[in-house]
Image (cartoon, rainbow, N blue to C red):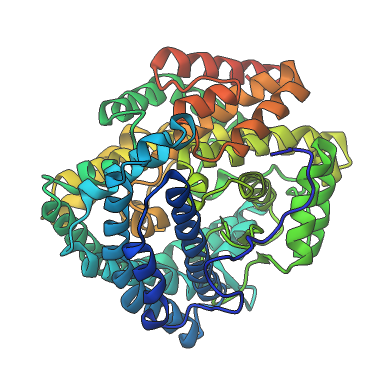
Amino acid sequence: MSTNSTTIEKIQRTFLPEDFTVTTWNALQPYFEDLKTRNLDSREALEQWLKDMSELEAVISEDASWRQIKMTCDTTDKTLEEAFTYFCLEIEPNMKPYFFELNQKLLASEFTKDLDPQLYFPYLRSVENAIKLYREENVPIQADLSVLAQQYGVISGKMTIMVDGKEYTLQQAARFLQSPDRSLREDVYRKIAARRLEDTDQLNDLFNKLLTRRHQIAQNAGFDNYRDYKFRELGRFDYTIEDCFQFHQAVKEHILPLQKSLILHRKARLGLDTLKPWDTDAEPQGITPLRPFETGEELTQKTINVFHQLRPFFAHCIQTMANMGRLDLESRKGKAPGGYNCPLAETGVPFIFMNAAGTMGDLITMMHEGGHAVHSFLSHPLQLSAFKEYPMEIAELASMSMELFTMEHWNQFFPDPQQLQRAQLEEIERIISVLPWIATIDKYQHWLYTHPGHTTEQRTQNWLAILHEFSTHVVDHTGFEHYRAHFWQKQLHLFEVPFYYIEYGIAQLGAIAMWRQYRTNKEQTLDNYMNALSSGYTQTLKDLYTTAGIRFDLSPAYIKELGTFVKDRLAEMNVN
């Protein structure tokens, strides 16, 4: 595709009627039957069959995505939850046996070998993997899991606290933790902790149900544990479980000391003898917390301005989304927590969901999700929906690299040079602090799923041991031991998308490498970036990183090298 194109077109239907909408399984089934029974007597017939299947997948995917988007935007509307649940329980389970048979049909065709191997290799590899993992008895369990996992958002969406007589979501309240008023910070932190602890038992019960069903799926598929099953299901063909352990160790050796130095730097700036958990995002007395924007509209416009400074194409992506109402940015009661960019496979214009409250973290989230959105735009022209099902390790590279590319243009949010440098430092602090947290969550997941049948107490003990392993031990958590013991419950990935977290660590390393490349040759780096994202999943993960101009490498030596690069950037900012 031309990376200079600023238009995006909805996929033109040739298989389904233009006015077709997903309502019931009975309405969908004839199209699956057509694909299942069609005679593939030539390469051309096979290619048309693939296009028709791709069109069907895009229509269904977009419908399912809208159901989830609407539900997360308003968790209080039971009709939206019911529409999503209906899809999970009544439509999706009926599709899975058909997709299994269609995958078999594809691999059995004598003309499959004539497809372009360079273009189709990742797709055909994924199809073969899906066939090996499919078990009919897992279909209803997976449907149940889809519904159960969404309960996390329902529970979390109800969490609010009162500050000065006003009700705030926990995301909105987090901005008070940046206040120079230490007593206010402590009060808010205690309220947030207390509110989260109210639902500890409910979240533990939910998690136990998820663990039980996930382990059953793994056993049904012939695996000893869900960890090993999930690695295969996620298509982790380019790295191993041992590579993850190597990542954990390298982060502990080469990143944790850098994080500790940054925390000590903040402690010195605050002039505190003891750093408490409500101090970690704070500013000293007399320094106003960074407030990059006030409203969602302001965040949108300033993001467009920032993206335009990089490349007009990036700005056009966000402007198009704004024009089409595909942004829901501000936090409010009843909205699910977190943030995401949801690709919409048929129209091609994605949806950004987040819980902005005017903080620096919200700015970073918008840059992050904006990178995902650009990825959606760039990969949309690819011929098949399957080509756009790119691995999360490249998806997160797109978003995390965009955070770093845009930093020099954050003067759109911070005209004052000192505030701009503070914002850039906050981003670097976040990058460094998130890597040990990623290692913590990932190592915890390895333990969770290789110890099926563990008790809640065993889970707590092992969580605390792993949390301690990746701690700098600078912050004093005395009095909050019980809260710390359940701190993992704030990580929605554990509930909703198991094992989807190491990808952030891999991509964060890749983004640092992209930033290093960008500082040497900006335009070439942006070309490499766009070429990689435009490729979707028509290259292997390692090849996609090569196209981006960097290498896929989890070795301690490489992590140390990237850590040194960040340390040098901090030295340029007079942070040691």
- Please determine whether, in this image, residue 360 is positioned above or below residue 120: below
Tell me: 481 left or right of 341: left
Instruction: Say whether residue 3 is left or right of residue 543.
Output: right
Q: Position of residue 438 (x, y in %)?
A: 42, 39
Question: Front-most of 399 and 295?
Answer: 399
Q: At x 32% / y 30%, what residue is drawn?
A: 244
Let me know if residue 286 appears in the view.
Answer: no
State the quadrant of the C terminus: top right
Q: Nearer the viewer, residue 303 or 146?
A: 146
Looking at the rendered image, the quarter that the N terminus falls into is: top right
**Residue 23 higher or lower than 42, as above or below:** below
Residue 234, percent across and down? 34, 44
Q: Quadrant of residue 172?
A: bottom right
Residue 33 location (% of width, % of height): 34, 70
Nearer to the camera, 370 or 533: 533
Q: Is residue 551 left or right of residue 490?
A: right
Residue 521: x %, y % from top left: 75, 18
- Classify 105 as above or below 116: below
> Residue pushed farthest right?
415
> Which residue is pictured at 49% across the width and 70% down the height?
68
Residue 341 visible? The answer is yes
Relative to residue 100, is residue 284 depicted above or below? Answer: above
> Residue 263 appears in which quarter of the rendering?
top right
Question: Which residue is at a point 37% across and 26% down the rendered structure image?
Answer: 247
How many discs mark residues in the rendered view? 0
At x 56% / y 43%, what residue is drawn? 280
Q: Quadrant of residue 525?
A: top right
